[in-house]
Amino acid sequence: MGEEKYVFWLDEIGKEHNDLVEKKCANLGEIRKLKLPAPDGFAISIRAFEKFLEETGVRKEIREIPNKTKDLRKGETLSEVSTKIRRLIEEIEIPSWLLSTIEFYYEQLCEK
């Protein structure tokens, strides 16, 4: 069995790949297929993000944040929870298996 692929060039994906890379990235791939103006680039798969959340333990921390929030019905509080989750993800070190893959794609992108 081959190794799982976690990153895809936008030219490799389209609207049929919403469940692989989410809708925004899939739509960028679709735009490129139609030869409309769209940037060169790549997309990180949902599976890679899920694996990142599990391996780093950040998924568990994310699930605990709403439990520590007093009133989730207030818009401001929801915004605060969202900010905490985003910061938590941004502060986690990217695992080497994902970082090396992203660096490879980025280097290839810069050579285009």
Image (spheres, grey):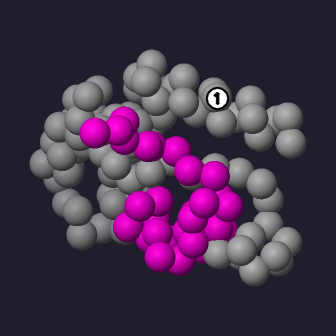
Q: Compared with residue 21, is residue 101 higher up or lower down, i.e. above or below?
A: above
Tag 1, which secondary structure?
Answer: helix
Q: Residue at x 43, y 24 (%)?
A: 97
Q: Which residues are magenta?
A: 1-29
Q: Residue 81 in the image: x percent, y percent?
A: 33, 51
Q: Quadrant of residue 29?
A: bottom right
**10 sits to left or right of 19:** right
Pointer 1 residue: 104
Membership of 18 in magenta stretch: yes
Q: Is residue 84 visible?
A: no
Does residue 96 show up magenta in the picture?
no
Q: Residue furthest front?
A: 1
Where residue 30 sits: x, y (%)?
Answer: 65, 75
Identified at 44% across, 51% down, the residue is 45
Quadrant the N terminus occupies: top left
Q: Is residue 44 left or right of residue 75?
A: right
Q: Circle 1: is it few (<14), some (14-19), or many (20+) Cα within 10 Å?
A: few
Which residue lies most toward the left here? 67
Residue 32 screen position, x and y as percent: 74, 70
Whether residue 61 is visible here, answered yes or no, is yes
Instruction: Please state the horizontal and vertical placement of residue 74, each as a whole percent of the image.
Output: 30, 67
Judging depth in this view, the residue of 102 and 92 nearest the camera is: 102
23 relative position to 60: left or right = right
- Say how many tags the image has: 1
- For residue 58, side relative to residue 90 (left or right): left
The residue drawn where x is 41% and y is 61% is: 20
**Residue type at numbered disc 1:** Phe
Quarter of the image where one finds residue 61? top left
